[in-house]
Image (tube, rainbow, N blue to C red):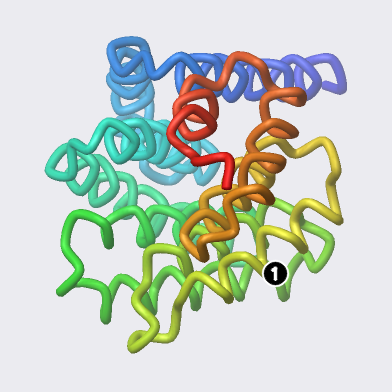
């Protein structure tokens, strides 16, 4: 039994690792291949929370890369499909901080494609990630996800760049090896016209994860001053 459990956990780690590798390379074809395989599993196992979560996670990575490549329509489509699966996972296991985090992340990923939807999806993004933080206050990923939501959510809807930067800084302090926290910190600082600090954050992100194409692109487009 213990062997089977460890094998299942290893499979999950490998799946997540493959998704991150494809995300880093902005390889949407590989991500979409994972999505198709995970969709089939999710359709066959609608009552399995982990299967629903993994499908939602894969859709979140597709949406992330689509946003990076300015394909807002594809980002919204993937995020909305992922939301449905994440909602199932949360309903099946409401005590899981990670399930709430991915649901909040997906809601936040809809916003860049449709600012008008920011009010409803923004509330979902912040409510779900705040729930994740309450369930697991030590989760750097939860603070990172809340920061991304705040980054995209207009100030009038409760978000804003200054709030986002505070969340990114919190995530980075909790997990100094979290490259994504440094990447998003750079984005936030640049939006506040703090370019030298932004470049330093991008450089740190690339030191932690040299394969992240988007981080390289953001460093290159950030002025020295």
Numbered disc 1: secondary structure: helix
Residue 97 visible in rendering: no
Q: Residue at x 76, y 17 (%)?
A: 4
Residue with the mark numbered 1: 133
Q: Is residue 159 left or right of residue 10?
A: left
The foreground one among 86 and 46 is: 86
Q: Residue at x 72, y 75 (%)?
A: 134
The foreground one among 45 and 29 is: 29
174 over 39 or under it: above or below:
below
The foreground one among 111 and 5 is: 111
The foreground one among 179 and 43 is: 179
Pinpoint residue 12: horizontal percent, then vertical percent. 63, 24
Q: Is residue 200 left or right of residue 21?
A: right
Pinpoint residue 164: horizontal percent, then vertical percent. 56, 67
Quadrant (top left/top right/bottom left/bottom right) for the N terminus: top right
Pinpoint residue 183: horizontal percent, then vertical percent. 60, 41
Q: Residue at x 19, y 54 (%)?
A: 113
105 over 164 or under it: above or below:
above
Pinpoint residue 140: horizontal percent, then vertical percent. 75, 54
């Amino acid at each position: 039994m213990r062997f089977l459990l460890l094998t299942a956990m290893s499979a999950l780690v490998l799946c997540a690792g493959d998704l991150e590798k494809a995300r880093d390379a902005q390889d949407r074809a590989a991500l979409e291949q994972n999505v198709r395989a995970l969709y089939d599993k999710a359709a066959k196992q609608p009552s399995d929370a982990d299967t629903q979560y993994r499908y939602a996670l894969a859709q979140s990575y597709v949406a992330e890369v689509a946003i990076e490549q300015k394909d807002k329509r594809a980002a919204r489509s993937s995020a909305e499909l992922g939301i449905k699966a994440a909602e199932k996972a949360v309903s099946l296991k409401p005590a899981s901080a990670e399930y709430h985090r991915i649901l909040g992340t997906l809601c936040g990923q809809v916003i860049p494609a449709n600012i008008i939807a920011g009010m409803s999806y923004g509330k979902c993004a912040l409510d779900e990630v705040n729930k994740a933080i309450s369930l697991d206050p030590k989760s750097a990923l939860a603070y990172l996800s809340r920061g991304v939501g705040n980054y995209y959510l207009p100030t009038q809807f409760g978000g804003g760049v200054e709030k986002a930067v505070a969340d990114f800084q919190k995530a980075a302090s909790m997990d100094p090896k979290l490259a994504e926290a440094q990447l998003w910190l750079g984005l936030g600082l640049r939006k506040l016209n703090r370019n030298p600090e932004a470049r330093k954050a991008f450089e740190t992100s690339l030191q932690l994860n040299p394969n992240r194409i988007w981080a390289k692109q953001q460093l290159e487009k950030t002025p020295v001053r």
